[in-house]
Image (cartoon, rainbow, N blue to C red):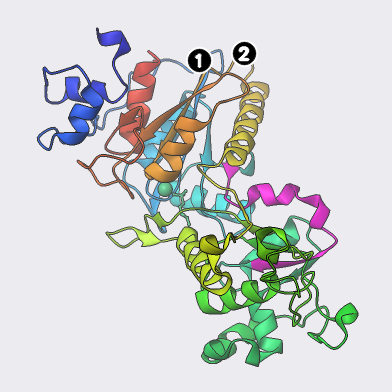
Amino acid sequence: MAAQLPPLANLVRAGSQCQRVVGRRSHRLLCNTHRIQPCRFLQSAPQAASPPSTVPEFAFAFDIDGVLVRSSDPLPRAHQALSYLQSQLIPFILLTNGGGKHESERVSDLSQKLQIPLNTSMFVQSHTPFASLDEYKNKTILVVGGDADNCRHVAEKYGFTTVVTPFDILAAYPAIWPFSQHLLPYYRPFARPLPAPIDPSSPSTSLKIDAIFVYNDSRDWGLDTQIIKDILLSKSGIMGTLSPKNGKSAFPNRGYQQDGQPPLYFSNPDLLWAAKYHLPRLGQGGFREALEGVWEALTGGQRNGVKLEKVVIGKPHRPTYEFAEKRLIEHRKALLAKHGGRLGHLKRVYMVGDNPESDILGGNSYKSPYKTDWVSVLVSTGVYVEGTVPAHAPRMVVGDVWDAVRWAVAQEKWG
Ligand code: G3P
Ligand code: MG
């Protein structure tokens, strides 16, 4: 019977010895007495065999917030977990829905915080895949979110030549959003002159936005919502104009976003994330939901057959896992090149995360083109609250990142 048990069942067997096995999943979800007991391991490291001669056929993808750090504070056993893997040449990447700084900057921050040597070849942020959108590199893009103008600098380092931000527009036209006037002194030091004026009387020379990228959590939901809404209702992305197609039922989506308006990209769907505060905080997904609420009110929304056309990447979405898997495969090859040995097929990736909606759903639903099995492991140090039933069932629930590593290497009979 044991073999075909649903994944989470191991916990029950390990934990409460519940005898009524049939339909365990539904039984457990409904039954209050069987609270999920995270699997925990002692401090001690597995008997470390001498460094292996081959790069193992398994690897790890670690989420950051709620797994390795809480805001800027490293979590207790994060260093131990990563240094053990490095001592065993077990490959891992960091796969976060966070961002807001260039990968090189974040990697050096994290290396210092976790006291672990890391490099950008093993690091994927929410907006990292934007770097490959070459079709907009010589166009004018709007970049939203993040502290000060950090995300502008990230976009420029990715090769985008003309990057405008909502606060550049506010600094040039304060009347465009009356309710952030008090922030102008804060914005002005890093606001830049616009590449073109907003002049609806001469659309051909007026500022035109060719793509909108939300790189990180908005710091000014009001301003960012106003500017994005203005562009999405404009004609061809020309600031200060209104598309005559808006609201016309003769057109698809009732004429909205049917007149050459720029595409809208979001890098991170997280509604909630684990920051310093003891309860999860609203993330970029919260801003998007608020924006979609405004769009719904402006356009009549679903009851009018209108939706907000957008592209959302980040965990749990497939493009981010495809991108991460390629990074991991390259990183394994680099490890091999450095340490020699044989490189077998990557059979399993342990996706360790704290958010069922992003890390676990993403790990569970990602079907690898390389037939690699992504095994989702949920830690209890972030968004997921210990003892509750996660919205998406992981392969294993554990206490913290060290427990995740210990459980996985035990599964692999490693060491
Ligand atoms: O803004 C970051 C947050 O949404 C989650 O980041 O590292 O837990 O994927 P992470
Ligand atoms: Mg997280």
Query: Which residue in the structure is indicated by mark 2?
Result: 341
Q: Is mark 1 on a helix, strand or loop?
A: loop
Residue placed furthest toward the top = 1
Q: Which of the 4 quarters of the picture holds residue 118?
A: top right
Magenta-highlighted residues: 123-143
**CA distance separating discs 1 and 2:** 9 Å
Q: Measured from the top left, where is residue 124 in percent x and y? A: 59, 44
The residue at 21%/34% (across/down) is 29
Q: Is residue 214 visible?
A: yes
Q: Does the magenta stretch include residue 139?
A: yes
Residue nearer the viewer, 130 or 148: 130
The residue at 85%/88% (across/down) is 201
The residue at 48%/42% (across/down) is 116
Q: Which of the 4 quarters of the picture holds residue 150?
A: bottom right
**Left or right of 376 in this view: 129:** right
Seen in the picture, residue 176 relative to 305 is either above or below; the reply is: below
Query: Which residue in the structure is indicated by mark 1?
Result: 52
Q: Which mark is residue 75?
A: none
Mark 1 residue crowding within 10 angstroms, few (<14) / some (14–19) / many (20+): some
Q: Is mark 2 on a helix, strand or loop?
A: loop
Residue nearer the viewer, 47 or 374: 374
Q: Measured from the top left, where is residue 390 in percent x and y? A: 30, 40
Q: Measured from the top left, where is residue 373 in percent x and y? A: 50, 21
Q: Can residue 256 be seen in this view?
A: no
The residue at 38%/42% (across/down) is 356
Residue placed furthest toward the front = 250
Mark 2 residue crowding within 10 angstroms, few (<14) / some (14–19) / many (20+): few
Residue nearer the viewer, 65 or 194: 194
Q: Are marks 1 and 2 in contact (CB under 8 Å)?
A: yes
Q: What residue type is labelled 2?
A: Gly
**Left or right of 229 in this view: 140:** right
